[in-house]
Image: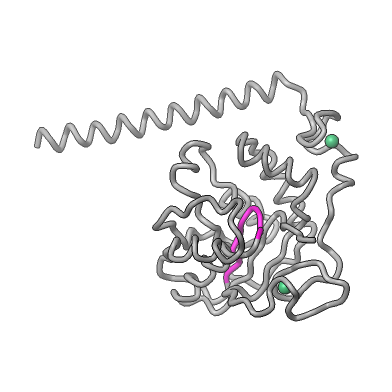
């Protein structure tokens, strides 16, 4: 009894402590936002999160694309040099912009500095550029537990919530991470696939068609592992949606 009370109180203390910490962080973020004029995350100039000049340098992925992986191609193709011969569990992958220059700066401000307005802008660019997939719900790639705790946000989840409005789709936390993969950065493509295999577990009640949101599409290995798991739990097709996509070559 005493133990249970103590542990109950411990949980409450922890919850209160974490709520205080996050509201202190939010308050500090809000104050910084009030005190500092907005600066462009890419060039440090201007008075917008992404100044007009840098926005003009974004490479929107609106032209002809590989139908499957969304790689820009000279003419429409079903498979491209990047995805042919690969087992990718998703039906399609689309992103708003190439992961380069100002897009890279925006993602880094969002992910590393926890700048939430960057997520809202990323969602705006996705909604403007990527056709809404024929999905019943939005799922997102769950973050790594410790990294999410440290930054206090999961960018993929945030992006999903920001796109939910314009696309009029519910966000459903269908996936969880069961195993922490090593960071994918710097790993070659084949190693990436092995690294993320078995990282995700889907909960029941997966709709037939799911849009899976992630912040950056690099090789597609993470998205494919998450899509495979959604299909194992009942999805018929999975459409990946990302803010930015790495373009090779
Ligand atoms: Zn700029
Ligand atoms: Zn392709």
Quadrant placement of the C terminus: bottom right
Q: Tell me where residue 161 appears, x and y as whole percent.
A: 60, 52
230 lies above or below 188: below
Principal secondary structure, stretch drawn in magenta: strand
Q: Residue at x 49, y 61 (%)?
A: 196
- Residue extending farthest left: 1
Quadrant placement of the N terminus: top left
Q: Nearer the viewer, residue 230 or 170?
A: 230
Q: Is residue 36 left or right of 90 when viewed as pictured?
A: right
Q: Quadrant of ligand 2?
A: bottom right
Query: Residue 19 magenta-drawn?
Result: no
Please give the range of residues in magenta.
210-218
Query: To which quarter of the image does residue 93 belong?
Result: bottom right
Q: Residue at x 47, y 77 (%)?
A: 234
Q: Nearer the viewer, residue 82 or 39?
A: 82
Q: Tell me where residue 162 appears, x and y as whole percent.
A: 64, 50
Q: Residue at x 63, y 70 (%)?
A: 239
Q: Is residue 12 left or right of 158 when viewed as pictured?
A: left
């Amino acid at each position: 009894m005493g133990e249970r009370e103590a542990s109950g109180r411990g949980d409450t203390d922890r919850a209160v402590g974490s709520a205080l910490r996050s509201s202190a962080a939010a308050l500090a973020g809000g104050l910084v936002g009030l005190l500092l004029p907005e600066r462009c995350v890419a060039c440090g100039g201007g008075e917008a999160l992404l100044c007009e000049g840098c926005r003009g340098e974004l490479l929107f992925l609106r032209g002809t694309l590989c139908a499957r992986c969304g790689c820009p191609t000279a003419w429409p193709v079903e498979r491209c040099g990047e995805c042919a011969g690969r087992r990718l569990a998703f039906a399609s992958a689309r992103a708003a912009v190439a992961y380069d220059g100002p897009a890279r700066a925006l993602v880094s401000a969002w992910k590393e500095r926890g700048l939430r307005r960057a997520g809202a802008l990323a969602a705006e660019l996705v909604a403007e550029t990527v056709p809404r997939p024929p999905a019943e719900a939005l799922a997102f790639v769950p973050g790594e537990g410790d990294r999410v705790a440290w930054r206090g946000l999961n960018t993929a989840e945030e992006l999903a919530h920001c796109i939910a409005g314009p696309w009029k789709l519910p966000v459903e936390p269908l996936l969880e991470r069961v195993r922490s993969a090593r960071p994918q950065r710097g790993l070659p493509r084949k190693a990436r696939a092995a690294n993320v295999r078995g990282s995700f577990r889907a909960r029941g009640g997966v709709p037939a068609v799911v849009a899976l949101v992630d912040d950056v599409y690099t090789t597609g290995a993470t998205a494919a592992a998450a899509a495979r798991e959604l299909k194992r739990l009942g999805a018929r097709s999975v459409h990946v949606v990302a803010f930015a996509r790495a373009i090779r070559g």
